Image (cartoon, rainbow, N blue to C red):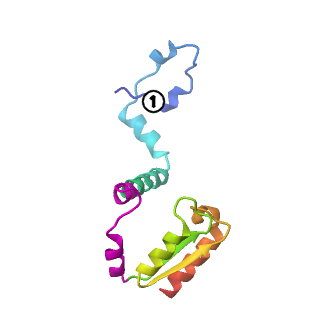
Amino acid sequence: MLLFDPAKLGRVSVEAHQDVAAIEPATPATLEAFLAGIDTRAFRFAEIALRNREMTARLTWKPYMFNPRLPHFLPRVTAPTLLLWGREDGIVPVICGEQYRRLLPNATLRVLERCGHLPLIERPDEFAGLVLDFLRRA
């Protein structure tokens, strides 16, 4: 693989494909300087999001979003648990949250009105308030 110096790519025109041959390959120093200017928090966030998606797939793949062993395992969870659910969740209905609340011995279910599957995004202030209140009490 041949990498090019990103600082010099700006002078390449789409029409003049010959310009590509004139670009100098990147050196370790130019790559290091380029990467030093990148905010790595975005990459870390993307990596965490990817890992979360992978774990979700592992836990919910077969059968899809159903694990017949959960009713046996959930009662063993003794940690205080806050379940935040959107009333209009079209992916995982509120009845599932009610089942989790029933099976988790120390769970509290809070249902957010006028909210779908992503309370953190759809109702950020209410979501944050509920989480902070839960953490203060835990």
Residue nearest the observer in this picture, 108 or 66: 66
Mark 1: which secondary structure? loop
Does the magenta portion include 89?
no
Q: Where residue 118 sits: x, y (%)?
A: 57, 62
Q: Where residue 101 sits: x, y (%)?
A: 47, 79
Query: Which quadrant holds the N terminus?
Result: top left
Q: Where residue 5 sits: x, y (%)?
A: 45, 30
Left or right of residue 77: residue 33:
right
Q: Is residue 119 above or below residue 31?
A: below
Does the magenta portion include 77?
yes
Label 1 crowd bin: few (<14), some (14–19), many (20+), radius 10 Å: some
Residue nearest the observer in this picture, 47 or 51: 51
Write down the region rendered in magenta. 56-78
Q: Quadrant of residue 69?
A: bottom left
Q: Is residue 133 above or below residue 30?
A: below
Q: Quadrant of residue 61?
A: bottom left
Q: Amino acid at mark 1?
A: Asp
Residue matched to label 1: 5
